[in-house]
Amino acid sequence: MELLLLRGKDQEELFAQARAKRSEHFGDEVVVRGVNEITNQCRVNCVFCPMRRENTRANTDFRMDSERLVDVAASVKASGIDVVFFQGGEIPQTTRVVGEAIPGIRELYDGNVEILLNLGNKRRSEYEYLREQGATSYILKFETSDPELNKQARQETLDSRMKCLQDLLDLGYRVGTGSIIGLPGQDVVSVARDLIFARDLGVHMCSVAPFIPAPNTPLANHPAGDVELSLNAIAVSRLLEPNWLIPAVSALSKRAGEGQYRGLMAGANVITVNFTPNEERDHYLIYGRDRFVVKRDYASELIARTGLRTRGSVFLEPMTGGISPLLQPSPAGA
Ligand code: SF4
């Protein structure tokens, strides 16, 4: 808690320590992912999300098919990125769509690709099927470790999410989780508990994102999450678990122009570039309509400004420990 509340010179010192830990464990490198948001339909009713179940009818909904997923993955590959990330609302249909796309994507990359998924709670047999098809990793955020707050925010039980996280770990996925900072009723004690909770889960990746109030949600008028607290939570995460992949999430930039830069300077080591085709991206309302979209050029400039270098997946075997050949600068105009 004390670390989370540091500001000024002490906060800078905390960030410096987090950077030193990152450097020790990963070198001065940042993993770059390419995300495609594959559907905005969702059966869950999270109070902070404009794609919540109650909004489905009012939104222009979409669901991509397997061929489109392979096409978008080809653009990710053309950009020199070897982490293909599929994210979408929690609906059972994504299991088959993604499962059928994975072999074609692996073929595009001759197998040298990390397939990362963020598709919500599913049955163990569905996770098993996706793993067999070639999925590498999965992100499932618990959002808050306080069971009461969790129930209020997600309108689901924390236990059901924990069961899914355990299934993913059992099945050999590289697993990511994460929390939101600034939910109603949350305080700094709760944020500190979230970080310890994540550490004890034994996951491989963990994110912290400031809450962003979105229109047409029950939390539309709730104040946004504190960016400084979020940055400190990133730094503390790095100190708690130096081996974690920790993203500098786009929500940091939505809240403060330099947020993602500061996220990297606070010890984060992942940037996600958005490859969702324009037509669908306009309907993926994760933070409302005016969300900040990270493009590849922006990500490259951002990483260069921090003095770090881009690298490929850390989950591919054999681990090279260096810059993935796929992430060498792309030819002009690519
Ligand atoms: S945060 Fe995810 S699970 Fe919750 S309503 Fe939005 S899309 Fe669905």
Image (cartoon, rainbow, N blue to C red):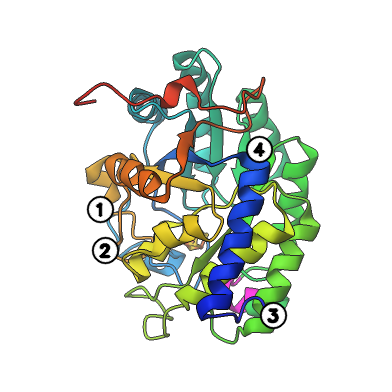
Q: What residue type is labelled 2?
A: Arg
Front in this rendered view, residue 243 or 178: 243
Whether the residue carrying mark 3 lies under 8 Å from ligand 1 is answered with no
Residue that label 3 marks: 1
Q: Which amino acid does label 1 sit on?
A: Asp
Query: Sequence-wise, which precedes: disc 4 or disc 1?
Result: 4
Q: Are marks 2 and 4 in contact (CB under 8 Å)?
A: no
Residue that label 1 marks: 282
Q: Which of the labelled discs sits on residue 126, or is there none?
A: 4
Question: Looking at the rendering, in which quadrant would you find the N terminus?
Answer: bottom right
> Which tag is nearer the camera, tag 4 or tag 1?
1
Instruction: Specify few, some or many for label 3: CA neighbours under 10 Å numbering under 14, 14-19, or 20 or more.
Output: some
> Which tag is nearer the camera, tag 3 or tag 4?
3
Q: What residue type is labelled 4?
A: Glu
Residue 151 part of the magenta segment: yes
Residue 261 spot, x, y in % from top left: 40, 57
Instruction: Specify few, some or many for label 2: CA neighbours under 10 Å numbering under 14, 14-19, or 20 or more.
Output: some
Query: Sequence-wise, which precedes: disc 3 or disc 1?
Result: 3
The quarter of the picture where residue 55 lies is: bottom left
Query: Sequence-wise, which precedes: disc 2 or disc 4?
Result: 4
> Which tag is nearer the camera, tag 3 or tag 1?
3
Residue that label 2 marks: 289
Q: Do the residues labelled 2 and 1 touch (CB within 8 Å)?
A: yes
Magenta-highlighted stretch: main secondary structure? helix
Q: Which amino acid does label 3 sit on?
A: Met
Q: Which of the labelled discs sits on residue 181, or is there none?
A: none
Instruction: Specify few, some or many for label 4: CA neighbours under 10 Å numbering under 14, 14-19, or 20 or more.
Output: some
The magenta region covers: 150-155
> At 61% across and 33% down in the image, what residue appears?
314
Residue 97 spot, x, y in % from top left: 48, 33
